[in-house]
Amino acid sequence: MKYAFINAKIYDFNKFSENQYVIFDDRILEVGHMNDFKDDNYEITDCKDHLVLPSLVCGHAHIYSTFARGMSVPFSATNFQEILDQLWWKMDRNLDNKMNYYSGIVSATDYMKNGVTTIIDHHASGVEITDSLNTLKKAVTRDAGLRGMFCFETSDRFNVEECIEENISFIEDNDSKSARGLFGLHASLSLSEETLTKISKVIKNYPIHIHVAESMMDQEDCLEKYNERVIERLDRHGLLNEDSIITHALFVSDKELDIIKERKCVVALNVSSNMNNSIGLPDYKRFKEWGIPVIIGNDGISSSITTELLTLLYTMHMKDESPLKFGLGDIHEIINNTYDYVNRIMGTKLGRVEVGYNSDLLTIPYVAPTTLNEGNALGHLFFGLFNSFKPNNVFAKGVKVVDNYQVGDELSKKYKEAKKYADRLWENIQKEDE
């Protein structure tokens, strides 16, 4: 089927144009001025009083965290390790593949309703490691129709050999524009020398996806046990392959930044989660000074990426004690870095409304109360829409996945079924605490 947007204002974080049409199937076939539009039996969406944008990307997610919503567990954490012990590690070790599947359905549905159609996920499930990534792939990329990059966070908390095999087999079996694999690791503090040595022998040139210095405890643990910092340790084991995702990186040294830069890795920021855990904030200006690409994630704390961008701007203003050192130009760069990263790894062309690009698109109602043009379009988005970003139509891979704010009946049905598996998870966790 071929679709056409007509009477559209288009902004793709590169160009702004008005009174446009867009014709597309799985790729954008034609973009032009309405004066030149000729209907050829397209399915037409009239975009008068709407913006057309490329759909969005989450650069670091935890899909399984969806089932933590509303969960009550004994909790008296005083530091980051205790947060892991009392909440997240208690949860992820009780996940099986049924739970993985339905958390994927819920998460993907919520993401698409927020205009996100590509998710870079960091997964853990202790009951079933094997086939967990294919289970997520089935939920997110087949049944929900989105794109995803998946990995299993290898940790000494789990069967390490199974973790390694799950990562390697998924990477080697998935080479499409819908699903790709990275090699997942939890964090240095949960990875022994034996484990890193095992990984180094099989990882080839596959990029890793790892938490680094999310709290100072990660660095302190590494210095105490190995007399080196986390990035130095990973580099000693030869694990920092090009395009590896270094998530958080709140407490990294100049030497570590040198290594990240030299190894051509990227850093994923997740400031809402950082504040929620009360562990600190990234020093973005140092990443920029070193020329290290920064992408945007949300660490699974929500289904939105626009609110994460809002939070990033405001927290950097507080950290810098200035409203001038970090601005919309930095937000613009981070958005485009995130598209660029996915395009490199997945072989996609996302992030532009141009001929030949993949048709991952959205429409959102917006009547500008002030002048809207190429010079201020991002400002309109940021201050006018990002705090409540609800597209009425969303396309992924050229398929309409959100139609007038609604998802399909089958997806809605599965979304409701998910509660049964969340309840089962909660019951299993409660049995641990008895």
Image (spheres, grey):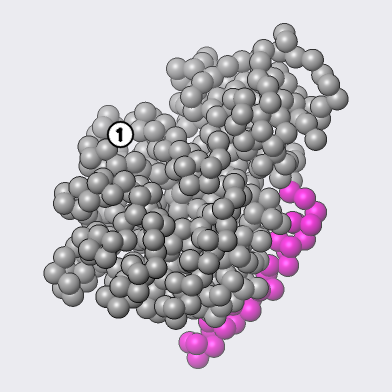
- Residue name at image x 39 percent, y 61 percent: 204
Asked whether the viewer can see residue 362, the reply is no
Q: Main secondary structure of the magenta part?
A: helix
- Residue name at image x 82 percent, y 19 percent: 39
- Residue name at image x 74 percent, y 48 percent: 407
Residue 280 image position (x, y, % from top left): 28, 55
Q: Judge by depth and name the residue closer to the eye, 257 or 369.
A: 257
Q: Quadrant of residue 367?
A: top right
Q: Secondary structure at mark 1?
A: loop
Residue 219 image position (x, y, % from top left): 22, 64
Amino acid of disc 1: Phe
Task: Check disc 1: other Cα within 10 Å, few if <14, some if 14-19, many if 20+.
Answer: some
Taking the image as shown, residue 298 lies to the left or right of residue 30, namely: left
Q: Residue furthest bottom?
A: 434
Taking the image as shown, residue 375 lies to the left or right of residue 250, namely: right
Taking the image as shown, residue 213 lies to the left or right of residue 365, namely: left
Q: Judge by depth and name the residue closer to the eye, 373 or 232.
A: 232
Query: Eyeballing the image, is 21 above or below 72?
Result: above
Q: Which region of the structure is painted magenta?
A: 407-434
Q: Judge by depth and name the residue closer to the eye, 148 or 329.
A: 148
Taking the image as shown, residue 62 lies to the left or right of residue 193, namely: right
Query: Which residue in the structure is indicated by mark 1?
Result: 326
Q: Quadrant of residue 98?
A: bottom right
Q: Quadrant of the N terminus?
A: top right
Residue 149 image position (x, y, % from top left): 53, 54
Q: Judge by depth and name the residue closer to the eye, 73 or 98.
A: 98
